[in-house]
Structures are given as C-alpha cells and as structure tokens.
Amino acid sequence: MKLKKNLVAATMLAGSMTALSFLSAGAAQAQGALVMYCGVQEEWCRAMVTAFERETGIKVSMTRKSAGEVFAQVKAEAANPRADIWWGGTGDPHMQAAEEGLTVEYTSPRMSELQDWAVRQWEQSKKRTVGIYSGALGFGYNTELAKSNNAGELKCWADLLKPELKDEVQVADPNSSGTAYTLLASIVQIMGEDKGFEYLKALHKNVNQYTKSGAAPAKAMAQGETTAGIAFMHDIVTMVVDKAPVKVVAPCEGTGYEIGSMSIIKGAKNMESAQKFYDWALSADAQKLGAEAKSYQVPSNKSTPIPPQAPKMTDIKLINFDFAKYGSSEERKRLLSKWDNEVKNLP
Ligand code: PLP
C-alpha cells in the first residue's frame, strides 16, 4: 500500500521533473545515479529498477549477469569500479567478494526486519553481504519428453544418470552460474567429495550443454529442448505457472539451497544511492516485486508474504549447507578448477 502511495507520489514527481527538464544538468544530477549489477531473472531486475527510479528519482543503469560473471567483473574493475551495487544472485560469490575486500561493510536500519538466515549471511561476511531471498536447488523434467524417452518418473539425483537420459540433461557451468556452483557444492556435501565427483562425471555423459546462465535449463525444458534441467526449484515453478508440461522435483537424497545476496561495491562512485537502494531493497514492499515478476523465492524480510507458488522448504530434504566454507575464496577456486579438470573436459 505504502509502495503504491509512493509510486503515485513518484509518478507525480516524474511529471514535475519533465516539466522542469529545462533546469541545469547540475539539478538533474542532484537526483543521483546508480550503477547496478543484477543477478536474478531479467524480468525481476527490470521491475526493481523501474520501481526504485519511480520512488527516488535516482536513475539506474542495470546489467544482468550470472553470479560468477558479476564476481569476475567486479574483481577486474576493482581499481576503478564501474558498479555501485550488486543485487541478487547466489551468496557464494558475494561471500568470496567480501573476503577479497571487493565490497564494503554496511549496516542497514532494516536489519531487525530480516529472517535469521539473512542476518547470518551478513554476520559471516563481516557485514559485507546480506541475504535477500532463499530458495532450494532441484531439477525438473518435461513430462512429455520423459514419456517419449521412456525415462519413467524422476525423483532422485541418481535418476538423472539413467541411460535413457543420454544427452537429455541440461545444467549451467559452475564457473559462470551460481545455480551450477550450488549444485557442485551440494553434491559434494551430500555424497562426499570422491563419490560426488564420480556422480558429476557420470552425469556429464547425459549432459547436452553447460549453459552460461543458471535459469536457461528451466527454459529449455519448458520449450521441449531437453528432457531434464537442473535449476533452482523456484525457477522451474515459473515454467509450471506459465503452463509448460514440466514437473518440479525435490531430489530424494536431499539438496542444497541458496541465500541470494546483496553487496555494496568498494569504491562505489554513488555511495549514497547505493545505500538508499540497499535499504529500499530490504523493505517488505520492494521484496513483493519478486513474486509479481514471477520469481518465487522466499523473501528475507519477515513481513513480505511468501508467495504461495514458492516451493515449501519444509517439504524439501535440505542439507545443512556450509555457506562459509563453500563461499570461501580458497574452496570455491579449488572446487571450480577440479570440476574444470575432471568433469568439463571429459569427452
Ligand atoms: N534466477 C533466479 C531466479 C535465481 O534465484 C538465481 C540465483 O540467485 C539465479 C537465476 C542465478 O543465476 P545464475 O545461476 O545464472 O548465476
């Protein structure tokens, strides 16, 4: 309601801004600017930009990239940062950026409004990244293609190794995608490192493509381009809501989950706008925009309603994901290079 009121006010403000557009560039700059790297689905990124611009008059320049790609870019730009805020995407590269001093400490006045898991992420990163949503990893399958491939019902990670699924499983590359890194870290935690890598090598035989973005396999599955796709369960729910013949699976062996995060870039040129965005993005009203953009994660503000479509965390066998370990620079680098050497380059 408050957001709506603010939107009305902002629309009026935008109107008066047009009327006053003859004012000097200096006056326009007073509204501020913000450069944002966005790690969720493009639709949700755009909805956030539009609402924030309306609410504050701050002009946002947004680029959508996968989690590992944002990390690489922020690191490459460290001497002369282009971005101010990194909003969304899995927590692990945010944690790594915190450890490597690429992001800064910030304490929002909204911390008391957040779920414990979101605050824990902030504490573990020494106040440099905060949880904005959470969601479990799983997979999905196109029921029509599964039938024509005689793949039967798929319930467990082990089912993705069925010979009937040769070249029929799609997943992203963990170097670029936070979703796929969550898979790598989850499998290692569920099966142990040796058995986990044996599993990933066997899975490789069935993988038709390692995509750049984590949500791509869910879309490909919905469009009938692959029978099975590994993704966050909430990304697959989006396809079901759009009436694709797709079933969402919470794997029987258990699964990992993400704490989608937000960080302010060290050396941000628009620090005030970055802090304004940070506080706003933690509000219950701003977090409601996720479900409106068909992103069904569990929001971190305790007052944001959990979308009814969101997979029920209590129905999923969740592992006790070690975010500090698997978000650490050393472990992330080690696991990614092991995956490159032992899995990706297999014939
Ligand atoms: N899409 C949604 C809805 C997500 O929640 C996330 C992770 O936070 C991603 C995409 C991750 O994207 P990627 O795996 O491309 O880094």
Image: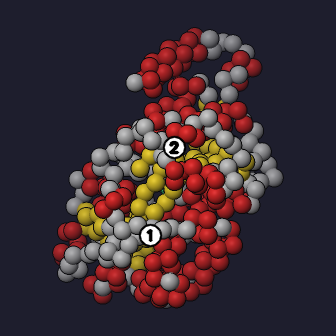
- In front: 46, or 347? 46
Say which of 338 and 346 sits in front. Answer: 338
Task: Tell me: 307 left or right of 181.
Answer: left
Q: Does the closest atom of ligand 1 sit within 8 Å of the Cβ of label 2?
A: no
**Disc 1 crowd, CA 10 A, few/some/many (<14, 14-19, 20+):** some
Residue 111 in the image: state x and y as whole percent: 58, 41
**Does residue 173 appear in this view?**
no
Q: Are marks 2 and 1 in contact (CB under 8 Å)?
A: no
Q: Badge 1 is on which residue?
A: 319
User: Which residue is nearer to you in this view: 327 or 168?
Assistant: 327
Q: What colour scheme does the image use?
A: secondary structure
Mark 2 secondary-structure assignment: loop
Q: What is the x, y in percent for residue 233? A: 36, 60
Callout 1: helix, strand or loop? loop
Residue at x 62%, y 51% (from the top left corner):
122
At 47% from the left and 88% from the top, the residue drawn is: 195
Q: Is residue 74 left or right of residue 148?
A: right
The residue that mark 2 highlights is 114
Q: CA separation, marks 2 and 1?
A: 22 Å
Under mark 2, the amino acid is Leu
Residue at the far right in the pictured view: 79
